[in-house]
Amino acid sequence: MRPRLLWKLKQREFPLGERTLVMGVLNVTPDSFSDGGRYLDPDRAYARALEMEEEGADIIDIGAESTRPGSSRISEAEEKRRLIPVLKRLRGKLTVPISVDTYKSGVAEHALKLGAEIINDPSGLTFDPQLARVVARYDAGLVLNHMRGTPETWAKLPPLPDPMAAILHDLEAAVHRAVRAGVDRSRIVVDPGIGFGKRGEQNSEILARLPEMARLKLPILVGPSRKSFLAQKTEEETLFATAAAVTAAILGGAHLVRVHDVRQMRAVVAIADAVLRNRPEP
């Protein structure tokens, strides 16, 4: 069984381990790899967030800057321009918490003022070290995602000699930086960063070795949804491939999964959780 842990946010707590939490992805960008432009309009983004809550999402994760391979960084002003209208519309309209996917401390602070409860840093505190101080000041939850290099350089990076060793080393350092900046460990979740600078074939290895992440003694989030290493000939086949990766992540110890297709993945999560509950103790 997964270790039972408690993830503390400012005004609520998530008991983790009994069932897998589903984080629904909402991209308010023109260029995300899977649904770029679909929810750029704030009204459509608002409607999709409500729909994901109805479908069973435990958390809504909103991102206003793409980190797809080859993407370029955008300014803080542009990220806020995309994000703020959506957060204003959603304020007080959801019963589940909002997470904001950003590495910029200025964006994070504005989002937390507008009611977001979690910051999901795709860079693992490597792009903007001030982010951790903002999170600490607002008693927010913090997801530390492992990223290697930058989206602009991923295509040129060689394979990692030992991907899980590198992930554990870098995440331990990120957690240490966060705690030193005042973030309580009980507010931190770690993510191995499927994709994010790893070569395609190594993402399957990361899923296979996910149990090794238990040594960090922190909740584990995995986001394999629609990643390029899962790509098939049709959208439907890619959805099935995502379902397989989500199942593997849960059986490997993930406490949370980050997905685009909330309704379909809730069914996948329910079965994977049932299998995990019936697994004999080692």
Image: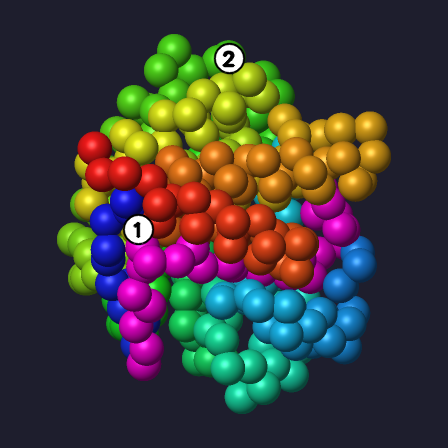
Q: In what element is the residue under mark 2? A: loop
From the top left corner, tell me how far across and down residue 228 is, in percent. Answer: 66, 30
Marks 1 and 2 close (CB-CB < 8 Å): no
Instruction: Indicate yes or no whether the magenta region holds residue 28.
Output: yes
Does the image show residue 164? yes
Q: Is residue 141 left or right of residue 46?
A: left
| On-image quarter of the C terminus | top left
Rendered image quadrant of residue 137: bottom left
Q: Callout 1, which amino acid?
A: Pro
From the top left corner, tell me how far across and down residue 208 is, in percent. Answer: 42, 25
Rendered image quadrant of residue 76: bottom right
Q: In what element is the residue under mark 1? A: loop
From the top left corner, tell me how far across and down residue 127 is, in percent. Answer: 42, 44
Extent of the magenta region: 11-36
The residue closer to the viewer here, 227 or 271, is 271
The residue closer to the viewer here, 83 or 185, is 185
Q: Which mark is residue 266?
A: none
Q: Estimate how packed mark 2 is, as few (under 14), some (14 to 19) or many (20 or more) residues with alpha carbons within 10 Å.
A: few
Residue at 24% over, 55% down: 4
Residue at 45% over, 30% down: 207
- For discs 1 and 2, the disc positioned in front in the rendered view: 1
Q: Disc 1 or 2, which lies upstream in sequence?
A: 2
Residue at 20% over, 45% down: 217
Q: Is residue 5 left or right of residue 68?
A: left
Q: Is residue 151 left or right of residue 42?
A: left
Residue that label 2 marks: 158
Q: Which mark is residue 219?
A: 1
Q: CA distance from mark 1 to mark 2?
A: 29 Å
From the top left corner, tell me how far across and down residue 98 is, in percent. Answer: 50, 71
The residue closer to the viewer here, 63 or 235, is 235
The residue closer to the viewer here, 152 or 190, is 190
